[in-house]
Image (cartoon, rainbow, N blue to C red):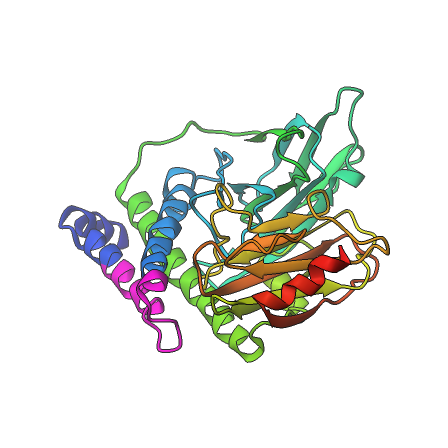
Amino acid sequence: MAEEQTVEQVCNGETWNQFCEQLRRSGEQIMRAEAPADAQTRAEGFRYLTRLLRIALEMHLEYADPDFPGFITPSHETAKIGADNPDNLYRYARLNGARRYRVSGQRGSVAYLSFGTQKGGYETNGKMIQTGFIDASQLQLDADGHFEIILSQEPQAGGNWLRLEPESNALIVRQTFLDRASEQAAQLHIERLDADRLPQPLDAHGLQQGLQRAAAFVENTARLFADWAQGYQAHVNQLPPADQPLCQAVGGDPNIFYYHSCWALADDEALVIEVSQVPRCDFWNLQINNYWMESLDYRYHRICLNKHSARLDPRGGLRVVLSARDPGLANWLETAGHPHGTLCLRWVGADTPVHPTTRVVKLHELEALADEQ
């Protein structure tokens, strides 16, 4: 009976109408009372929903069959989620925890490479709980940098193994560049082992399930990070440690210590962010986002600094200046035409994180800092 009802709903257009209604309802997250109501923030907010929809349709309709997984890129230059890292190449594949998979590839030369299996999802409970993890420091490679990783519930006797649980439903791969111009990304391929069927044509159930999950992903993702942005209003122009368990619960990398906050500056103001001494770590970066926690357009603006691009002082300390105009100082980040937004700092693989301090100054006060360079 349920199958007949699904077929009827697809054929009479009800499935499509419900999909469109949930997308319409997603717009309420952009119209929230606490969110800025200026035209720029609203325009970026509604564009953000279209970006989430592009991601969601690939994730839950085009590449939804875990028996025939393929990698998609869930955050990139024009589709962004939850303080997406401008230095990252993200790859994502749908899984079924009851199956066995093989990821094969070539290591490349990226500074950091990690693989994590997850369960849950923004489209369901708003969480992505890690079920297995391995990074490049643990990978067994051949002389040419090639590797294979088996994904399964049962441990493997030898080689690289990534744990699955019965509820595991996704694989997220993070590749982090110090310098995209000079580093080579890892080449990756994923396949299900022991596949016992060929891909089937799309049917009514597949369409309905895919559209329902895609619409839920858009609405729930928009709500989740709008909630985060709302919470940051308690510490404007500061950069305190984030709630680390919460970051991990939504899919964060366990090797990363996160800081999240928001900023708001007048045209004649600058935010100065300082770290007394950058800790020894595999990687770090600091990025500037809009209100919706999308990284600003790093294709054309300098909105991110990392371990490679930043200039430290002789003692190993860091000073970053965020402002609308170039103050002529090292480590300047652009507001890129935005009067407010969010920001994120990551220490990756640091034994002990060093917390930053912040202060707002007038642009003319930066002349004194220039004398210190």
Identify the residue at the far left of this view: 12
Which quadrant: the N terminus?
Answer: bottom left
Query: Any magenta on residue 41?
Result: yes
The magenta segment is: 21-42
Identify the residue at the far top of this view: 144
Q: Residue at x 69, y 28 (%)?
A: 108
188 shown above or below 283:
above
Q: x, y (%) of residue 156?
A: 75, 37
Q: In which quarter of the image is residue 49?
A: bottom left
Q: x, y (%) of residue 365?
A: 63, 68
Identify the residue at the far right of this view: 315
On the rendered structure, is 212 left or right of 112? left
Query: Any magenta on residue 260?
Result: no
**Between 166 and 370, which is closer to the camera in this rendering?**
370
Q: How many marks?
A: 0
Q: Which residue is drawn at 73% across and 42% down?
A: 135
**Between 170 and 260, which is closer to the camera in this rendering?**
260
**Between 338 and 189, which is closer to the camera in this rendering?**
338
On the rendered structure, is 151 left or right of 371? left
On the rendered structure, is 92 left or right of 372? left
Q: x, y (%) of residue 212?
A: 33, 54
Q: Quadrant of residue 242?
A: bottom right
284 shown above or below 41:
above
Q: Which residue is drawn at 44% across and 39% down?
A: 65
Which quadrant: the C terminus?
Answer: bottom right
Q: x, y (%) of residue 48?
A: 38, 55
163 shown above or below 68:
below
Whether residue 154 is visible to the viewer of this picture, yes or no, is no
Q: In which quarter of the image is residue 62?
A: top left
Whether residue 23 is visible to the viewer of this picture, yes or no, is yes
